[in-house]
Amino acid sequence: MSEKILVVDDGKNICEILEFNLTNEGYDVECAYSAEEALAKLTPTHSLILLDVMMGGMSGYKMAESLRKENNSIPIIFLTAKDQENDMLTGFSVGGDDYISKPFSVKEVIARVKALLKRSEVTHKTENPVKKNQLVFDDLTIDLDTKELIIGQDIIPLTRTEFDIIHLLASNPSRIYEREDIIDRIWKDSPYITERTVDVHIRRLRKKMGEKAAYIASRPGYGYRFNENAS
């Protein structure tokens, strides 16, 4: 079954171009011309959203923020004419997974869509002996099949990128990952990602983890590591 993509942009020409090219790549594409229309059309069958930032009515940022508050972790790629670093960081801070500036290359959009959808299928090697498809640290579990972070009995809703980051760190707790290492592994096909982007995602991840935020330790001047003894 084809992966279903929702394209949200008030520019009908852009929607038509993306729909045509993504359909040719084998995706099932649906278009919405406002955030309000997109929210009405969005279903659990959608695999990814291509979301314009500047639209009449609700902005793309507001739509993404609304979805994340509802614990909807569907991957989101922002499409926007804004290309300043602070604009990108705003997109990531409200739960976006990637950011493409307009005017864009259709080939670039397709490559980034494929890369983001592929992330969920990538299995990192691990020496954790508990269960093949889980990383377990006391009362914290990272389930690689369901792509869920579980603390105690609670499932912590993460975006695709947030899950990828904690999975990366926890797969090798003895290693300190520099920000550039994390960028290379998580956003290798995204040329505009900066070290501040990593920090934004780490802050969001720690906030969601609450009292268990200490599992993600920082080493000033170096980077981040997973502290398996944090419990």
Image: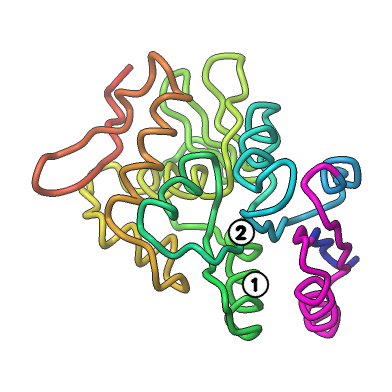
Q: Residues within 10 Å of mark 1 (few under 14, many from 20)?
A: few
Q: Nearer the viewer, mark 2 or mark 1?
A: 2
Any magenta on residue 58?
A: no
In which quadrant will I find the C terminus? top left
C-alpha separation, residue under disc 2 versus residue under disc 1: 11 Å
Picture coordinates of residue 92, whole percent (x, y): 47, 47
Q: Quadrant of residue 64?
A: top right
In this view, 27 is above or below 20: above
Magenta range: 7-36
Q: What residue lies at 54% left-to-right and 53% top-to-bottom? A: 97
Q: Which mark is residue 77?
A: 2
Label 1: state its secondary structure.
helix
Picture coordinates of residue 184, whole percent (x, y): 35, 67
Answer with mark 2 or mark 1, whichever residue precedes in sequence.
Answer: 2
Which of these two is toward me, 226 or 81? 81
Tell me if label 2 and label 1 are in contact, CB under 8 Å: no
Judging by the rendered image, the residue that carries numbered circle 1 is 114
Picture coordinates of residue 166, whole percent (x, y): 43, 42
In this view, 48 is above or below 202: below
Amino acid residing under circle 1: Lys
Q: Residues within 10 Å of mark 2 (few under 14, many from 20)?
A: many
Q: What residue lies at 63% left-to-right and 60% top-to-bottom? A: 121
Left of 221 or right of it: where is 157?
A: right
Q: How is the image coloured?
A: rainbow
In this view, 79 is above or below 208: below
Q: What residue lies at 80% left-to-right and 71% top-to-bottom? A: 15
Picture coordinates of residue 130, whole percent (x, y): 49, 35
Any magenta on residue 9?
A: yes
Amino acid residing under circle 2: Ile
Left of 115 or right of it: where is 182?
A: left
